[in-house]
Image: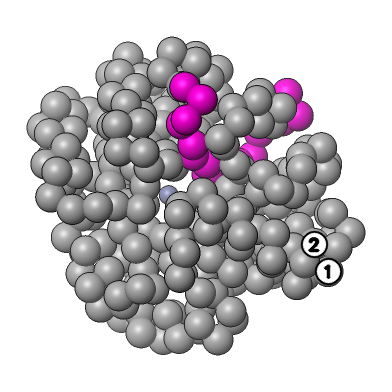
Amino acid sequence: MIDTHSHIYLPDFDKDRLAIIENARNAGVEKILMPNVDGTSIRPMFTVEEMYPGYCYAMMGLHPTSVKGDFEEQLANVKHWLGQRDFIAIGEIGIDLYWDKTWEREQREVFRIQVDWAKERGIPVVIHVRDAFDAVFQELDKVCDDKLKGVFHSFSGNKSQLHKALEYPGFMLGINGIVTFKNAQLDKVLKEADPERLMTETDAPYLAPVPYRGKRNQPAYMKNTLEKLAEIFEVSREEMDAITTRNARQLFAIDH
Ligand SMILES: [Zn+2]
């Protein structure tokens, strides 16, 4: 398994990060991909990457909920780092209108700019969408070309949003613990997707799958999400693992 979205660098894991990484390895997690949030998360993310080389990989990007009054400065910082070294992806970026619509215009602009940076570098985008599928699709339609690839991380949309998302040929859906929540009904939606377009993630420390729902999530818990996916598509857990891991390797160009 590859945990394609994990905030393992957050202070939530400062006391026991070593044990959490051990749990992940023991559960069969081969790699952990770390999305950035904003200027405050870059250093801790780099530190974790240095501590676990070849296991934890950093992305670079500005999260939509961090798009506020200082967004130009924040964006300049992201651009600075993109010029310094390689990253596995631009993320996480996107639009979030759940908490606050005040910065919607700026969120849209920041999203488009970062998608362009991914296109220039030929690396995938990791997209966060919350209460904003229409806005994300609108903006993506303006900048998407046939080479752009990426993932709708933490996908929890309805059937029409699923089909629209999969119309972007280079895109996958990132599935996490939400698929194990009974009230989310995501299993019924996902049945209409081709497993070849799915990847697994945790979004740790958030969104722990059943039976850990409500607790701090960690990469090792991804096996519960994988089991649920195997059940939905009526394949073995090994088969589901092989498919989703291959998809992740392909999207993020991981060849080792
Ligand atoms: Zn995230």
Please report the residue visible at 51 percent of the width from the left and 33 percent of the height from the top. 130
Give amino acid for label 1.
Ser
The answer to the question of whether label 2 and label 1 lie on touching residues, with beta carbons closer than 8 A, is yes
Q: Sequence order check: which comes first, mark 2 or mark 1?
A: 2
Q: Left or right? Give the position of 180 relative to 235.
A: left
Q: Which residue is mark 1?
A: 236
Residue 126 included in the magenta stretch of the image:
no
Q: Residues within 10 Å of mark 2 (few under 14, many from 20)?
A: some
Q: Residue at x 83, y 69 (%)?
A: 236
Quadrant the N terminus occupies: bottom right
Identify which residue is drawn at 14% across, 27% down. 72
Rendering quarter of residue 160? top right
**Label 1 neighbourhood size at 10 Å, few (<14), some (14-19), many (20+)?**
some
Circle 2: residue type: Ala
Q: Position of residue 247 (x, y in %)?
A: 60, 54
Query: On the image, which quarter does residue 143 sit in?
Result: top left
**Furthest residue to the right?**
234
27 in relation to 141, above or below: below
Name the side, left or right, on which 122 lies relative to 71: right
Instruction: Please state if 97 lies on the left or on the right of 240 as rendered.
Output: left
Q: Which dot marks residue 230? A: 2
Residue 29, placed above or below residue 188: below
Image quarter (top left, top right, bottom left or bottom right) of the C terminus: bottom left
Q: Is residue 67 above or below residue 50?
A: above
Residues shaded magenta:
145-160
Residue 182 in picture, x, y percent from top left: 77, 51
Query: Looking at the image, can residue 170 be seen?
Result: yes
Query: SS of the residue at dot 1?
Result: loop
